[in-house]
Image (cartoon, coloured by chain):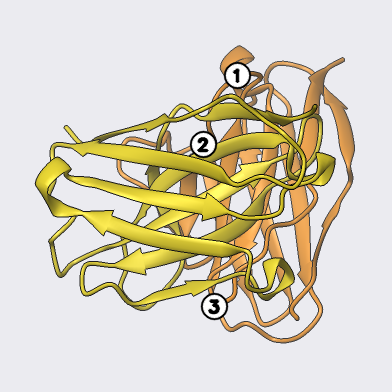
Amino acid sequence: DIQLTQSPSFLSASVGDRVTITCRASQGISTYLAWYQQKPGKAPQLLIYTASTLQNGVPSRFTGSGSGTEFTLTISGLQPEDFATYYCQHLTRYTTFGQGTKVEIK
Amino acid sequence: QLQLQESGPRLVKPSETLSLSCTVSGASINSSSYFWGWIRQPPGKGLEWIGSIYFTGITYHNPSLKSRVTMSLDSSKNQFSLKVTSVSAADTAVYYCARRTSLLLNWFDPWGQGILVTVSS
């Protein structure tokens, strides 16, 4: 099984900050990784797939990068609506998700 | 606009079978372009993929759930369904249905709003 480990698990930040979340895979997965945002009581929403492709309608302040075993999600200029939990997911057949990173207001 | 909506009993007794349906509007579940999937999230915890189904009826599911999972399609209702047998408290979760947009890779968009299913006597 491919395991995904996100860091940090919790992050406190202010509006306007640049935030980076890391997702590490237990084995190489090329660019087969997606990122989701989940707000309390809501379903996850797809932000990025294949490591760096921005889903339609997602603001350009969200960027994804990486390949192999290390990936990052960067939010450039954190907005009030970005405070949420973020999950990575590897895209191979028997998929799993990272444990999540909660971005809180400092 | 594609929308998905989960439905089914919100309370299931231990050892019984959990049954959920997902009604799709704005697209046909008979499309050869997509898979349809189920994901769950225990309260306060992370996401767990349950399984996915293709319009041909081909399914594959999370090995950790072993043989307890069954998925099916109902074209007449444009729905797909999930059954989980022999449930326990560990199956208490919000269950989401979603479309898998790529035939080759396993990302999901959009998702239904989710339904909380509690396993309790």
Real-space Cα separation, disc 3 to disc 2, in angstroms:
27 Å
Residue A61 - label: 2
Mark 1 lies on residue: A79
Residue B22 - label: none
Chain B shade in the render: yellow
Give me the residue at 89% from left, 46% from top.
A8
Give the chain letter for orange: A
Q: Quadrant of the rendered structure where residue B86 is?
A: bottom right
**How far across and how far down the image is residue B54, in percent?**
29, 69
Which residue is more in the foreground, B7 or A80? B7
Q: Quadrant of the rendered structure where residue B59 is?
A: bottom left
Q: What amino acid does circle 3 point to?
A: Thr
Specify the subunit that label 1 lies on: A
Residue A92 - label: 3
Disc 1 vs disc 2: Cβ atoms closer than 8 Å? yes
Question: Do circles 1 and 2 both sit on a common chain?
Answer: yes
**How far across and how far down the image is residue B38, in percent?**
49, 52
Secondary structure under the numbered disc 2 in the rendered image: loop
Mark 3 or mark 1, which has the lower sequence index? Answer: 1
Real-space Cα separation, disc 1 to disc 2, in angstroms:
9 Å
How would you rate the neighbour count of disc 1 (Cα within 10 Å): few for under 14, some for 14-19, many for 20 or more? few
Establish if B117 lies above or below B70: above
Q: Which one is closest to the eye, mark 3 or mark 2?
A: 3
**How far across and how far down the image is residue B40, in percent?**
62, 45
Q: Which one is closest to the eye, mark 3 or mark 1?
A: 3
